[in-house]
């Protein structure tokens, strides 16, 4: 169970990662930060992304992996944290599953 401090930090990190992605992406696909999960020791964070169109997911994750140090510097300049977390980007499969369920319910 995430603590209140972790939940606040997740919300702030998601906001600033979204700003970073908006500035750095080439706008060829829609990239949305769905959520962030920070470790209890605040040393690692996983940023979950949703990408449209879906065929560009691999290229977006590869792009974000190349730019993760820049993202970390961006966070360092905007958030006052004792430890700046290491970043990992992943596709949010939970969001994809939810969209698939919604589509199946509409079809039924």
Image (spheres, rainbow, N blue to C red):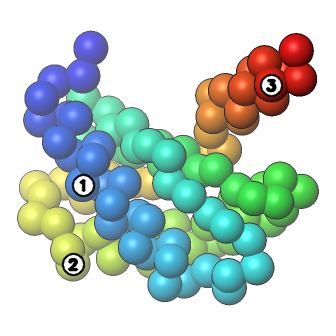
Image quadrant in which the N terminus is located: top left
Which circle marks residue 77 in the picture?
2
Q: Position of residue 20 (x, y in %)?
A: 43, 75
Who is closer to the viewer here, 5 or 85? 5
Which residue appears at 63% of the width and 71% of the height?
66
N-terminal label among 1 and 3: 1
SS type, badge 3: helix
Displayed quadrant of residue 40: top left
N-terminal label among 2 and 1: 1
Q: Is residue 93 left or right of residue 10?
A: right
Image quadrant in which the C terminus is located: top right
Which circle marks residue 12 in the picture?
1
Q: CA distance from mark 2 to mark 1?
A: 13 Å
**Is the residue marked by circle 3 packed among few (<14), some (14-19), or many (20+) residues within 10 Å?**
few
**Is the residue marked by circle 1 packed among few (<14), some (14-19), or many (20+) residues within 10 Å?**
some
Which circle marks residue 106 in the picture?
3
Which residue appears at 50% of the width and 77% of the height?
22
Q: CA distance from mark 1 to mark 3?
A: 34 Å
């Amino acid at each position: 169970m995430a603590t209140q401090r972790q939940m606040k930090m997740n919300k702030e990190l998601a906001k600033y990662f979204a700003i970073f992605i908006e500035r750095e992406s080439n706008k060829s696909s829609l990239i949305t930060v769905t959520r962030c999960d920070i470790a209890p020791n605040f040393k690692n964070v996983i940023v979950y992304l949703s990408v449209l169109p879906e065929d560009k997911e691999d290229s977006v994750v590869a792009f974000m992996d190349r730019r993760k140090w820049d993202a970390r510097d961006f966070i360092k300049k905007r958030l006052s944290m004792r430890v700046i977390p290491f970043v990992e980007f992943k596709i949010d499969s939970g969001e994809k599953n939810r969209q698939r369920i919604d589509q199946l319910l509409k079809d039924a």
